Amino acid sequence: MRKKIVAGNWKMNKNYAEASVLMFQLLEYKKNNPTNCEIFIAPPSIYLTTAKEIFADKEIGIYAQDMSEYPSGAYTGELSVEMYQSIEIDGSIIAHSERRLYHGETDSHANRKVKALLDAGLTPIYCNGETLEQRKNGQHFEVIKNQTQVALFTLSADEIKKVVIAYEPVWAIGTGETATPEQAQEIHAYIRSLIAEKYGKEVADEISILYGGSVKPDNAKEIFSKPDVDGGLIGGAALKLEDFSKIIEAFNP
Ligand code: PEP
């Protein structure tokens, strides 16, 4: 059975004190509330070691928001897979649309980063999704196919099984505009069919595909109820325990 996951991408938010408070709130919440999904957070990298200390018993998964494709060297400002491995975090988000938009990240970069993480035994959360213009032009299937193939299809079946995919239509990120549950299901099923075509149904059925884009407490349950939606990558609503916990509870019966 593939994993159900609610992952919080904190982006570039919160100072140290604020980040610590939210981590302790999450710890308390996790201890007192049985959940029907795994919980991940991706705080700013500067707080990853704090997160490791606070969640010392691995109550929740700790992820970075990006990673260098290079193993080490003269890449000022970058962080390597070995650094992440050495502080024992679980993995990293890769190719978030904001990395694509502001840092020119492509699926070829994503492919190398995903492979580096897998080689190190860490989990990539690989993001893809179409822009508003691409959707309006009816290109969304083509865009998703291309992104998925370039970023992931050099992996072996055993490797791709370990990747978490996040479908995040760019037009729905941070805009308050959400894909309808049917739109999310349509693309999730499509991504799974692409993987099934290349690697077989059994492999495709093992991969968790998360939806991201303005998921909120009031729409999470309906989106997560779709058969190919295995959870969410949450931005804005991950910054307050009150909202994030309600999204986690969308998996409760
Ligand atoms: C995200 O950044 O991955 C995201 C989905 O953001 P938001 O939930 O704020 O739309």
Image (cartoon, helix red, strand yellow):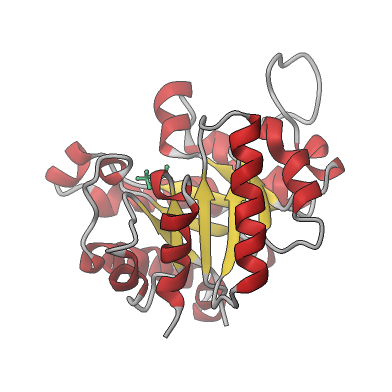
Query: In this view, which residue lies farthest toward the bottom?
Result: 253
Q: Which residue shows up at 52% across the image and 41% down it?
A: 10
Give percent across and percent down for residue 58: 76, 61
Give percent across and percent down for residue 188: 36, 65
The quarter of the image that holds ligand 1 is top left
| Left or right of 140 in this view: 10 | right
Q: Which residue shows up at 66% across the image and 41% down it?
A: 20
- Foreground residue among 223 and 32: 32
Give percent across and percent down for residue 176: 24, 45
Q: Say if 165 sits above or below 44 in the image.
A: below
Query: In this view, which residue lies farthest toward the right?
Result: 86
Q: How many marks?
A: 0
Residue 44 can be seen in this image:
no
| Left or right of 54 in this view: 185 | left
| Left or right of 218 in this view: 204 | right
Q: Which residue shows up at 31% across the image and 50% down it?
A: 214
Residue 243 can be seen in this image:
yes
Q: Say if 116 sits above or below 105 in the image.
A: below
Q: Which residue shows up at 51% across the image and 51% down it?
A: 8
- Can you say which quadrant of the picture contains the N terminus? bottom right
- Foreground residue among 188 and 214: 214
- Foreground residue among 80 and 235: 235
Q: Say if 173 sits above or below 144 in the image.
A: above
- Can you say which quadrant of the picture contains the C terminus? bottom left
Give percent across and percent down for residue 114: 63, 46
